[in-house]
């Protein structure tokens, strides 16, 4: 027994020494890793959400002149806000990684703008915004960037809601500082993009607010609006964006045609129903003069595209949830006219073309009352769908939709065709001019127009993107306003900007930022729950309609039988009639109870699934720990038994 006691004592000492040594190694490894591997990380997320894209690496490696980034963060004021401090650490780590990749051309500084300090005054002067605290002090967490030419860009405040956009925000800021000259984007539109839905009236009253996408395009590009009647596209324009135009003259169409023939690139947005224009009329109380409620482009057919401006795509699977007041028992309903199109790793399921740089990694794009394209007969261009509906879709008359837009009624009438409709497409390859020859010049106000560039009959390398929706620009569908101090910030909930700006950058030959924009969102929809909700919606609407019809019929019969009693002649009712009335009343009570049961059952499946998942999450970890403890206990008992069996 003395040998066993000595052996057990040695084992206890060895175990204590091992624990102490392990603690020392653990603390030392943590300290060393924090110093040497601060920016190193292993990204195990499915979509590589925390891995820098090739576009970021290319921009950082190709910086020709030094750029200075100053990160302003209120260390002491944020001491009691752990989530803010954690996000600041995320920004700090990313900036360190950027600095490492830039190879000396990126200078990163961190400044603590303490309350009432010169640093705080400097931060305010730069346009940075402080988040107020209950103590009356402000937390600053923004960034200012400068280049050698006194160019300046800022991120007023790093919002945690925009964490998925963090790499894009930083890299696009660096890219703007690195560019000597912004590329020029021409804009032809009949939408009030620069004034918002208030239009010219709001601009005159000083209350206009540009759409967010328009404001962002102005920051990224040299935006040059063109009147919708011109004879030639200016030579300084690299790409032409046509957004829901009015009916263009032959002179203007010829100018666009020849722009394409000379190698110019076009992004065209047409729309069977412009909800922006409709909103303008609703807010003004009368039709807005010159507004375009649906748009077409005569050149589409010559580009190899067939488009019908009188058809709208309805999609039951991609329908957005809207607040609808017509049904008090069920105010939030699916509206198949407004679509929330989503990406997926499986190309067969994704609404976006995974092979195209513009749409390859888009997470979600919100559209409204969209049209569709098909490849025209005899087209010479390659027709590549970029955005498509689901196969749970159908076509609907735009004229009928203007009359009947009730969501429940549209779902009742829904008859899916099983076809996926193309909402956006890329056209590329050889293309012949839509004009067999140059038209005669048009005289204006008695003045002889200047000579047009030489006529070109064909091109071998056309590059055009067409989109059958213009409400992609509407803030209502893709951003949510959020108050930050005395400023209202637009927080994206979809990738509408990523698609529009990404398409423009792609056409302008800059692909480096495309991968950043398409990483904008990490939305992972619960597909099982959505399928259950869709099935419940269909069942609810069908049974609700049947039960309401039965209730109405029963009430009519009751009213007819009760008419003598209502006139004060209760004796006019026979015993059979009174029995029939009681029967109908019981049936009415039973039907109403059944209707309430159907309404309660609308979410029963989803709630049941949630309960099962919650039970699994609660029970799984304790059971796993118990299993590990049992294995350790059995292993220890076996070792002790073997030790006791050794000879003394």
Image (cartoon, grey):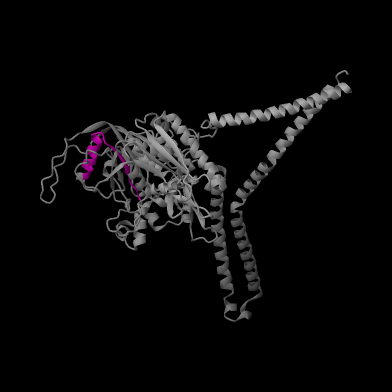
Relative to 6, 98 lies left or right: left
Residue 562: which quarter of the image? bottom right
Q: Is residue 351 magenta?
A: no
Q: Position of residue 260 (x, y in %)?
A: 25, 36
Closest to the observer: 277 or 497?
Answer: 497
Q: Is residue 267 magenta?
A: yes
Q: Can I make out residue 118 in this image?
A: yes
Q: Position of residue 46 (x, y in %)?
A: 53, 34
> Which region of the structure is painted magenta?
252-272
Residue 151: which quarter of the image? top left
Which residue corresponds to the image point at 54% horizontal and 43% vertical from the top-left?
A: 85
Relative to 494, does residue 19 appear above or below in the rendering?
above
Task: Name the image quarter holding the C terminus.
Answer: top right
Relative to 643, 505 lies left or right: left
Q: Can I make out residue 517 in this image?
A: no
Q: Position of residue 267 (x, y in %)?
A: 32, 41
Closest to the observer: 250 or 39?
Answer: 39
Q: Position of residue 447 (x, y in %)?
A: 10, 48
Relative to 630, 584 lies left or right: left
Which residue corresponds to the image point at 82% horizontal and 26% vertical from the top-left?
A: 9
Closest to the observer: 307 or 196?
Answer: 196
């Amino acid at each position: 027994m003395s040998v066993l006691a000595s052996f057990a004592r040695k084992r206890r000492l060895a175990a204590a020494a091992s624990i102490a040594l392990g603690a020392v190694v653990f603390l030392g490894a943590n300290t060393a890793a924090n110093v040497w591997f601060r920016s190193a990380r292993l990204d195990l997320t499915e979509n590589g959400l925390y891995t820098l894209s090739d576009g970021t690496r290319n921009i950082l490696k190709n910086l020709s002149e030094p750029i200075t980034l100053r990160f302003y963060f209120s260390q002491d004021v944020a001491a009691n806000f752990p989530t803010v401090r954690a996000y600041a650490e995320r920004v700090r780590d990313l900036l360190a990684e950027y600095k490492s990749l830039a190879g000396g051309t990126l200078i990163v500084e961190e400044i603590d703008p303490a309350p009432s300090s010169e640093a705080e005054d400097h931060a305010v002067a730069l346009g940075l915004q402080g988040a107020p605290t209950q103590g009356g002090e402000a937390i600053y967490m923004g960034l200012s960037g400068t280049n050698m030419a006194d160019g300046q860009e800022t991120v007023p405040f790093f919002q945690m809601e925009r964490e998925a956009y963090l790499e894009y925000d930083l890299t696009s800021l660096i890219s703007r500082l690195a560019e000597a000259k912004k590329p020029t984007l021409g804009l032809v539109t009949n939408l009030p993009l620069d004034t918002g839905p208030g239009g010219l009236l709001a601009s005159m009253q000083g209350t206009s607010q540009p759409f967010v996408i328009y404001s962002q395009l102005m920051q990224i590009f040299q935006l040059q609006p063109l009147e919708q009647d011109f004879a030639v596209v200016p030579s300084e324009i690299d790409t032409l964006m046509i957004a829901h135009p009015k009916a263009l003259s032959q002179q203007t169409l010829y100018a666009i045609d020849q722009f394409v023939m000379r190698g110019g690139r076009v992004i065209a947005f047409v729309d069977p129903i412009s909800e922006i224009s409709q909103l303008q009329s609703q807010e003004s109380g009368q039709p807005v003069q010159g507004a375009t409620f649906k748009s077409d482009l005569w050149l589409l057919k010559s580009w190899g595209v067939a488009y019908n401006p009188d058809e709208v795509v309805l999609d039951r699977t991609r329908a957005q949830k809207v607040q609808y007041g017509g049904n008090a028992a069920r105010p939030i309903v699916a509206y198949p006219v407004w679509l929330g199109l989503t990406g997926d790793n499986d190309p067969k399921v994704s609404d976006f073309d995974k092979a195209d740089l513009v749409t390859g990694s888009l997470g979600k794009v919100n559209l409204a009352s969209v049209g569709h394209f098909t490849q025209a007969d005899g087209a010479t261009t390659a027709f590549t769908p970029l955005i498509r509906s689901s196969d749970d879709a159908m076509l609907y008359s735009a004229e009928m939709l203007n009359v009947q837009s009730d969501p429940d009624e549209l779902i009742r009438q829904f008859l899916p065709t099983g076809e996926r409709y193309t909402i956006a497409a890329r056209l590329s390859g050889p293309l012949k001019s839509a004009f067999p020859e140059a038209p005669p010049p048009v005289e204006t106000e008695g003045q002889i127009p200047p000579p047009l560039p030489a006529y070109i009959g064909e091109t071998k390398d056309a590059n055009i993107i067409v989109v059958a929706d213009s409400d992609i620009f509407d803030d209502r569908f893709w951003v949510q306003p959020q108050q930050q101090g005395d400023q209202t910030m637009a927080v994206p909930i979809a990738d509408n900007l990523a698609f529009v700006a990404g398409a423009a950058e792609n056409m302008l030959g800059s692909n480096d930022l495309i991968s950043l924009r398409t990483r904008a969102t990490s939305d992972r929809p619960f597909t099982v729950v959505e399928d259950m909700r869709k099935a419940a919606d269909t069942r609810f609407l069908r049974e609700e309609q049947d039960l309401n019809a039965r209730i109405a019929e029963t009430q009519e019969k009751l009213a007819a039988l009760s008419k003598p009693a209502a006139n004060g002649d209760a004796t006019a009712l026979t015993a059979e009639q009174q029995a029939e009335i009681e029967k109908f009343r019981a049936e009415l009570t039973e039907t109403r109870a059944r209707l309430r049961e159907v309404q309660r059952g609308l979410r029963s499946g989803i709630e049941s699934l949630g309960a099962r998942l919650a039970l699994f999450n609660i029970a799984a970890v304790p059971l796993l720990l118990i299993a590990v403890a049992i294995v350790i206990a059995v292993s220890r008992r076996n070792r002790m038994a073997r030790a006791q069996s050794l000879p003394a």
